[in-house]
Amino acid sequence: MTQKYVYAFGNENTEGNAEMQDLLGGKGANLAEMATLGIQVPPGFIISTEACAHYFKRKNSFPPKLWDEVLARLKNLEQVLGRKFGDTENPLLVAVRSGARVSMPGMMDTVLNLGLNDATAKGLAKNTKNERFALDSYRRFISMFGNVVLGIPGEKFEAVLAKKKLKRNIEFDTEFTSRELKALIRQFKTLVVRATREEFPEDSMQQLRMTIEAVFNSWNTERARTYRRLNGIPHEWGTAVTVQSMVFGNMGDTSATGVAFTRNPATGEKKFYGEYMINAQGEDVVAGIRTPNPIEKLQQDMPEVYQTLVRVYQKLENHYKDMQDLEFTIENKTLYLLQTRAGKRTTASAIKVAIDMVNEGLISKREALMRVPANQLDQIFHPMIDPKAKLKLLATGLGASPGAAEGKIVFTPERAQELADKKEKVILVRMETSPEDIHGISVSQGILTARGGMTSHAAVVARAMGKPCVSGVSTLQVNVKRKKCTLGNIQLKQLDSITLDGTTGQVIKGAVPLIQPRLTNNFLRMMDWAEEVRSLQIRANADNPHDALMARDFGAQGIGLCRTEHMFFDEERIFLARKMIIANDEKIRDEALKKLLPIQREDFTEIFKVMDGFPVTVRLLDPPLHEFLPNSSAEIKNLANRMEVSPRALGGKIESMKEVNPMLGHRGCRLGITFPGIYRMQVRAVAEAACKLIKKGVKVFPEIMVPLVAHVNEFKVVRELIVETAEEVMQKTGVDMNYKIGTMIELPRAALTADEIAVDADFFSFGTNDLTQTAFGLSRDDCGGFLNQYLEKGLLTHDPFVTVDEDGLGQLICIAIDKAKKVKPDIHFGVCGEHGGDPASINFFNKIGLGYVSCSPYRVPTAILAAAQAVIQEDR
């Protein structure tokens, strides 16, 4: 049986419906659906996504019989409309549009008025008795075809147009006379010859074939590929091509074109929202060449058409049970629908629309939960750039932590602190950040780095603090000494103002107005519905009482990761930590640890208070000790003076502690084995804080977690230390503390020998950040230079540091779970890496039966919603 590639719509023989988006693309499937509903759409036909896929497989050539099918459908269209394609007396013109299975607004190409040439333009003028309209359509076609099909930059046509307007001293295209349009057409054709060294094609069939090929090829433009990569759309899907008979909004004052939403896409308000232009074609509204009219004014200009449009939008919203984005054209007071699709909306709008539609009886609570993209939910909590603001873009990197921030550029954490103390807003700009920068990060409005990815230090810390971060800006060069940086060819100096959009990754010149979002009753109601559905518990990564309280307010059911190293970076604490690390004498080290003990105990006391009744997982010290030590000669000299040692000796000690590959070096449980005093102090602090509060009636459930275990013997040694210390405290205080001891599974060997480790472990927490690094052999801070190429070339379908690699990493996790359950059925499992806040990863974790995920406080609502959506998807 010969494969079918072309499907008709808009007449009695419509072939397709809204369920066929994978084959017909969203645009084509919805056009067929509207035709079936009796809504007036210009008839046409759709070339399927399968044809596009075959086109690329055949090295950019049509599949066999495709062109024959196109010609057959074109002939049918001629018979339906009584016009003939390429005819000089009564020509049929078509629009050729792209249409992927999911909406990719503006990413691919469209050509309108196809079929015009010198002869058919005269026929159109004669047939419509409107020469100016025919000439206007012809000049539009030449510029669109020249740009989309022939590859001539659109700016070149715009330059010709602008020059002619300037000469005539006119503002709008509609002011051109027929004579001027004829001259413009000649100039456009000359431009084509100069750019391509060939005449503009006059043959309508040649125009059609070339345009279909160009729309197929637009699937692989740089912007389309980038959009797909950012939105997780597979490259192999391909686009459908819609060939549709033209209707004209540029025939005069009785014609128009417009775009409308069935509800307000920014706020969700149940109010018809949109714009239109009289005597215009579709691209005019988007291009902004004239100020469009608000949709309400159409009620005055064309009252009957407006009432028809209202009936149509209400019918479509009730049919699709979702807010719709409509494109329409009015030709001589007759309304035609060119497109309907689920409207893009802000997160706040998505929540309101979903809640309202439940109240209106259109959808169920579960359907409402699926209407809000979980990965966009954190927009609710962060300042956003005012949509009305005019922006001057400096660069684009990775949107590593959402929200927007503006402030003065600083290049060191010390300068950030200094200005913040004076109540000035700053943006910390670094080539990359380290734990040493934590004090600067904490007082900055946002962070900008040249290096690093979505799980780099800057990104992880920024998300935990709810601060916007843009990382991996390859054009950024920072000169700390000269107090300046460059973004491409633009130079900025310290205290210049910039704005960051951590959601989109944009770096913008100057201070741009920001707007503050507000948590609404609708949001709280949506979270309540999600709580009713989800099965995964949601915990938070929190290292201080403020973050813990925030997490609990957002609905966290405990702390899944308390990083104790973050507690050391206060000025006095870092000195004690450094003293302990550098000490050659055991006595000096013990003295430093004794001074750190009450500080750590107070930290845990405050966190346990906030999390009354919920578990708190405390990770013992993890990073290499040299990360706590100073790097610059000035800092070394200052520390040497305080410690009363020579700077040279101190510098030598610091140098001796540096490692070639610290990620796999002297860190994690290896520290606890070689420097047991550190872990003993931390466990004592946890136990003393817990016992003190238990006496006061606070419900405390500490879970002590051993990091970077590779071998069961490592875990046994550290577990023995923990039990010995905890029992000593309990005996001394007379309090029975209900505590657990577990480990992070972040090395492949630990996953593969999980049955051995589980014998002595109460829980496993999968540290997916390091597990991804060690499973892939990738450094998350160094792979930014080539990982994008892997994604672009399809070697990887997604960034494994953002969304869990189910085929590889996922298998390691499943192996560990299966092995552990065989020896200890009641052991519990969680995730505390950045994947714990990623909706796609949460779907996987729900599927394999984990007990909880843990993420930064600001991502807790995202995780709650994603966990509910995972259950709904599984049920489906």
Image (cartoon, rainbow, N blue to C red):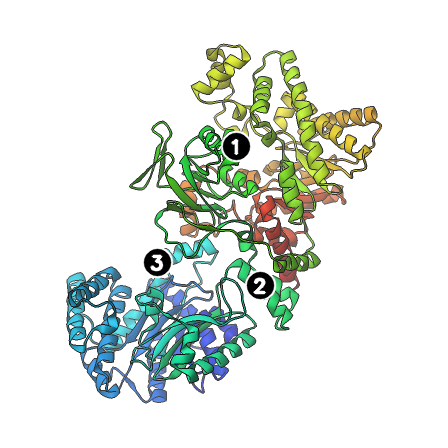
Please report whichever mark, 3 or 1, sits nearer to the chain's N-terminal start.
3
Q: Say which of marks 2 and 3 sits in front.
A: 2
> In this rendering, is residue 302 above or below 102?
below
Q: Which mark is residue 352?
A: 2
Label 2 amino acid? Lys
Find residue 448 and report its image quarter.
top left
Label 2 – label 1 distance at C-alpha: 37 Å
Q: Quadrant of the N terminus?
A: bottom left
Q: Which residue is mark 1?
A: 438
| Residue at screen point 62% across, 48% down | 860
The amino acid at mark 1 is Ile
Quadrant where the C terminus lies?
bottom right
Measure the C-alpha gap from mark 3 to mark 1.
Answer: 40 Å
Local secondary structure at mark 3: loop
Nearer the observer, 552 or 141: 552
For numbered disc 2, what is the local secondary structure?
Answer: helix
Disc 2, disc 1: CB below 8 Å?
no
On residue 394, the disc is none
Q: Position of residue 824 (x, y in %)?
A: 76, 42
Up the image or down, 347 lies above or below 84; here it is above
Q: Is residue 318 visible?
A: yes
Q: CA distance from mark 2 to mark 3?
A: 35 Å
Tell me where residue 755 appears, x and y as whole percent.
Answer: 70, 39
Q: Is residue 861 left or right of residue 635?
A: right
| Residue linked to disc 3 | 221
Residue 61 in sight from this viewpoint:
no
